[in-house]
Each structure stands twice: as C-alpha cells, then as structure tokens.
Amino acid sequence: MQMKEKDLVTVNLLILELATMVVAIAMAFTAQLISQLRSITSYEIIEFFLITVIVIWFWWIYVMERLEYPPKSDVFPVYDVLILISISLIPLVYRNGGLRYLSALFSFMMLFWSFMIYHIIKEHSEDITKEEEKFLRTEAKLRICIVIFSSFTVLISFYSTFYSIIIFSLVTLFILMSAYVHKISRINILKSHRRWRG
C-alpha cells in the first residue's frame, strides 16, 4: 500500500529518530566496554575515537540515503532494521571478536544495504531518472564488492592475523574512497543533467 505525503514526512522523522537511537546504543556499548578496562591508555582512546567515527559515518550515510529515498509503502523495512542493528553492534563485535568478526559483520551489513538499495530502485522507479537509477545500481554493486572483500578478510584471518589486518585496512580505505568518489561524481552529473534540462 502506497503512503500519503504526510505519512512520508512522518516516516522520515521515524527513520531519523531510529537511526539516532542506534548510534546512542552503539556509544553505550563502547562506553560500557571502556568502563570495564582497568586502565585507559592512549591506544584505547584512539581506538574509541576511530570506532565512534566509523559508527557515526555509517549512520550519516544511512540517514542521508533514506531521507533522499524514504519508504513509499507500509511494508516492514527488514533491510533497514538489519542495517541499523549491524551498525549498533560494531563497537561490541570489534572489542570482543576482533577484526575477523568485524569483517563478517561488515559483510552482512553491506549485503543488507545492497538489498535495501535494490528495493529503493524498485519503490522509486517512477520518481528517479535513469542517471539516478544507474548510480544507485552502482552503489549496490560497490557494496557487494565490499561483501566479497570482507568475506575474504574473514577467511585470511584464519591463516594470518597480519594479512587480515592489511586486507581489512584496504577494505576500509576502499569503502571510504568509493563512497566519496561516487558521491562527488553523482552530484556533478546530476547537476549537469539539471542544467541541460533547464
């Protein structure tokens, strides 16, 4: 069932509130883990800072994407919930499971995210341009690439922790660079498309 415009505004607010609550849960997990330490070193502080940045970064990407393409039906948003749960678990999984389990979590999260994007394309097929659809499909494919790399990191971690750290670092760099480059190119092409239409 399609929702009315007023309902879509409500959904946007709910998305923002739910996503913010997830970040709060993640921060609570991190604070609890730090409080269990007997002494806090500079390494723990840097670690806490980096994990917090990662959580907020994923939160920001999710919120921006969903505010731009909100759900248009009253179907339960399974993929959204799974993504937000994955984001909230990042500090806990990293602290207790290390890079192996964090890579597995990233793999599942990106898989759910790619499914969500394909669902967005299906729901907004009448509203988006061909250029936007092309970019969304590329974003979904990039996330599937991350799923493959993260899964490979998990397998390598059984053989060598050192190599798994290197691959995980490369995966993280790939996530950051692909998101940035793809977003910038998308903005530029959409601007030129609007100018051409104007």
Image (spheres, helix red, strand yellow):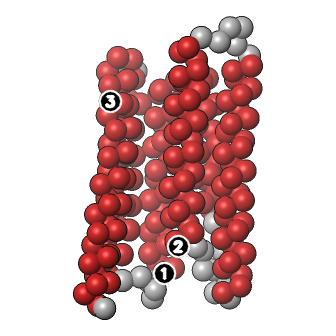
Give the quadrant of the C terminus.
Answer: bottom left
Contact between labelled residues 1 and 2, with CB atoms less than 8 Å apart: yes
User: Label 1: few (<14), some or many (≥20) within 10 Å?
Assistant: some
Of the image marks 2 and 1, the number of the one nearer the N terminus: 2
**Left or right of residue 37: residue 150:** left
Location of residue 51 (image quadrant): top right
Residue 113's place in the image compared with 119, above or below, is above
The answer, for residue 148, to whether it is visible in the render is: no
- 10 Å neighbourhood of mark 2: few (<14), some, or many (≥20)? some
Which residue is the site of mark 1? 124
Foreground: disc 2 or disc 3: 2
Q: Residue furthest bottom?
A: 198
Furthest-top residue in this view: 38
Q: Are marks 1 and 3 in contact (CB under 8 Å)?
A: no
Instruction: Give residue 177's position: percent from left, percent from top.
Output: 32, 46
Task: Give the camera-side residue of 93 and 151.
Answer: 93
Let me know if residue 6 appears in the view: yes
* Helix, strand or loop at mark 1: loop
Q: Secondary structure at mark 2?
A: loop
Task: Please state which of the two labelled residues, at mark 2 or mark 1, is closer to the viewer.
Answer: 2
Residue at image location 72% in from the left, 41% down from the top? 25
The amino acid type of the residue labelled 2 equals Tyr
- The residue that appears at 32% across and 43% down in the rendered structure is 174
Distance from disc 2 to disc 3, alpha carbons, whole Å, reads 32 Å
Element at label 3: helix
| Residue at the image point whose x is 37% and y is 45% from the top | 175
Residue 187: percent from the left, percent from the top? 34, 68
Residue at x 71% of width, y 28% of height? 31
On the image, the x and y values in percent for residue 150 come to 39, 38
Residue to which mark 3 is pinned? 167
Quarter of the image containing the N terminus? bottom right
The residue that disc 2 covers is 69
